[in-house]
Amino acid sequence: MTVLRTRRSRITGLIGAALAAALLVAGCSASAEDSKTASSPGSEGNALPAAEGTTTYPLTLESPYGTSILEKRPERIAAIVPNAVDTEMLLALGVKPVLSSSMVKESASQSYLLPYDAENLDTFEFAMGGTLPVEAIAASEPDLIVAVGWADGLGGLSMGDYYERLSSIAPVVTSPDTKSRMLVPWKESIRVLGETLDLSNAAEKVVAEHDQYFAKVREENPQLAGLTATWAIFYGTGNGLQYLSAPGSAPATFLGELGFAENPRAKEFVTQSTVGEELLENIDADFLLIGRSAAGSEEDFDKLTGGKLFQALGAVSSGHWVGLPPRTADGGDVLWAITSGGPIGTTWAAEHIVPLISAKL
């Protein structure tokens, strides 16, 4: 029996409940009612590339919540992470899940996922404040439930509240260290997926191609090297401005891949992400990327960015900042891609924002 021991990355801080809500409010308009459009048990299952022969089954899937046994290579895979980053990773591996969160369509009418036929995936509806539709998941008759990329608190839910029921339906694979992070970097998760699905080589290829792309970005944009940066999103007057590039987070990893250095000020937001007026000066960096979610009006965003405290920031006074709208011209959600994107979304995000950054430096 093979034991899949997921690697634990460096410890990163907790991000508050306000962020957990804001991340899913940012671009979604899901129904408040949990429903499903799950595939029927007799319908076509997921497309799964040929096995590589690098994984031995039965496979023990260890997680912070419990252990389950995957007896053989799965064929019907349900991806249940609320923000659908697990679905994005599966698509990057050439796998079509039998079920996914509606966020794969809602959050991103995601232009960057359209080439992967994401709009035709069977989904369950997820709304903030709702529950995970265990019945819909069971109805899709999965032989593996994928929850990689899910950290406790995401969408207001705790995986620990669902693990026992989910594992009674099918074996469950999760990311490591999900209890101490809100935004789990996707590379460690896709490697876990690769081993679970006997697609480790495919997972490494996705990582390698991603790394090659960003190496080229850094080579072509040497002006970014060594500069510090901040990524924050304004979620309206309710959740306010949230600092999202704390050390070890997925957005911090993304900024590093562009060539930016870690911002020492980011440590101020390791245990909480809300940026009140008293903390606004701490978001300063060599360059600021500030997004406006769909929950924040343009008027309120202009009031924030036009205020004396914001205008006094060094990056702002030097013109080294960019404000990003909720949607790009092609309908994509670059805020979502930077914050929650996987290998597909982060590449697409870089294509959109690097020219904007370069134009300001």
Image (tube, grey):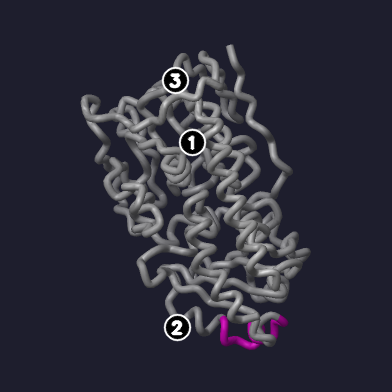
* Residue 264 location (% of width, % of height): 78, 64
Name the residue tied to disc 3. Answer: 73
Amino acid found under the numbered disc labelled 2 = Glu
Amino acid found under the numbered disc labelled 1 = Ala
Name the residue tied to disc 2. Answer: 299
Mark 1, mark 3: which one is toward the viewer? 3
Identify the residue at horizontal 56%, vertical 81% (top origin).
304
Q: Secondary structure at mark 2?
A: helix
Callouts 1 and 2 close, C-beta under 8 Å? no
Rendered view: 247 above or below 171: below
User: Quadrant location of residue 11?
Assistant: top right
Res. 31 visible in picture: yes
Q: Which residues are magenta?
A: 305-314
Name the residue tied to disc 1. Answer: 147
User: Quadrant location of residue 311?
Assistant: bottom right
First along the sequence among labels 2 and 3: 3
Identify the residue at horizontal 52%, vertical 56% (top origin).
346
Seen from the viewer's position, the closer of residues 113 and 178 is 113
Rendered view: 254 above or below 330: above
* Residue 338 location (% of width, % of height): 53, 59
Q: Is residue 311 magenta?
A: yes
* Residue 71 location (% of width, % of height): 47, 14
User: Quadrant location of residue 245?
Assistant: bottom right
Mark 1, mark 2: which one is toward the viewer? 1
First along the sequence among labels 1 and 3: 3
Q: Secondary structure at mark 3?
A: loop
Rendered view: 279 above or below 166: below
